[in-house]
Amino acid sequence: MADFKGTREAFAQAIIDMAAEDNRIMFVSPDSLKAMRATKFAELYPEEYVEVGISEQNAVNTAAGLAATGLIPFVGTYAGFLTMRACEQMRTFVAYPNLNVKFVGINSGLLGGEREGVTHQFYEDLGILSNIPNYTILTPADGPQTYHAVKAAAEIEGPVYVRAGSGRETEVYDKDTTFSMDGIRILKEYGNDTLLLSSGFVLDRVLTAAEILKEQGINVIVGDINILYGKDPSKILEAIKKTDKIVTVEDHNVNGGMGAYISKLVVENAPKSVKRIGLTTFGESGPAKEVADVYGFSPENIAKVVAEGLK
């Protein structure tokens, strides 16, 4: 595995490494070669690179055709351009026939729209796909995890969506830590006052919040939820049953994402309090870290919500 920085670069490196060993790996680009940092892939594997231009719906249909012949196509571009502009194609021509197409959506979440603003911030993608059968949804927390998530996607039979970021993510994992197929990885276990769950690119903030809480005498479990609406949530249920309070944190709308998923599991298996930290409005442009603080993702605010829930 070569060195890389950021989730887009991680995607490109993963498909390069896979293509070196498996000639079924394809990249279908709707004018997203540079955005996906995949120029080197096209140079190394020109026969495995398909450019369709600015036409996301065509990209999805092209990938469906490739998958129907036994290939493993990846379609990568901005998350909303896939899940909104090409939603019908992702539903009807990939999910319905359960074809082996992999999607990587970049610039997902509030933190992705530093330069472009609300038109390129996408915090509805998980809610959209969670309503479409057959998708496996992977939400890696940083660049290293995105690399391993992309490789894991190739091994999963059927449609997969990998939620990737913009390149501003703080690395939490080392590059050798593989992607957990349990759907959760417990990173801190100070005590069972609250189960503090993160999904996606706010994990570093959640871990910092756990340290702030520890200094206040509040000891939490921190879990990284990296598969949403998975087929086997048993490990997540094990964590849920350890505490009476749960707080979820995600760079996505509170509806349809990780918080909604955890709430569903809680109601159906172990009813208790769940507080969700996420977006309820559209975002705005600005430096990613400062915007995240404004919208409630600061470690201090996360710690405050946990503490208030214990009163």
Image: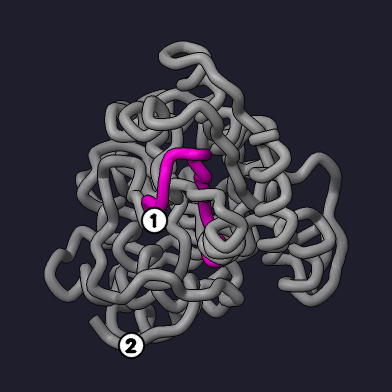
- Considering only vertical position in the picture, is 86 above or below 262? below
Q: Nearer the viewer, residue 23 or 139?
A: 139
Q: Dot 1 lies on which element? A: strand
User: Badge 2 local density, few (<14 within 10 Å), some, or many (20+)?
Assistant: few
Q: Position of residue 203 (x, y in %)?
A: 52, 60
Asked if the residue under mark 2 is in contact with the one under mark 1, i.e. CB atoms within 8 Å, the reply is no
User: Badge 1 local density, few (<14 within 10 Å), some, or many (20+)?
Assistant: some
Q: Position of residue 136 (x, y in %)?
A: 38, 37
Q: Nearer the viewer, residue 66 or 85?
A: 85
Q: Quadrant of residue 9?
A: bottom left
**Region in magenta:** 188-204
Q: Is residue 198 magenta?
A: yes
User: Sequence-wise, which precedes: disc 1 or disc 2?
Assistant: 2
Query: To which residue does mark 2 refer?
Result: 3
Question: Is residue 22 visible from the viewing direction of this image?
Answer: yes
Name the side, left or right, on which 195 lies relative to 121. left
Query: To which residue does mark 1 refer?
Result: 188
Image label count: 2
Name the kind of residue labelled 2 in the image. Asp
Q: Residue at x 43, y 39 (%)?
A: 192
Q: Residue at x 24, y 39 (%)?
A: 157
Label disc, if present, on residue 146 of the rendered structure: none
Name the side, left or right, on which 283 lies relative to 274. right
Q: Is residue 158 magenta?
A: no
Name the kind of residue labelled 1 in the image. Lys
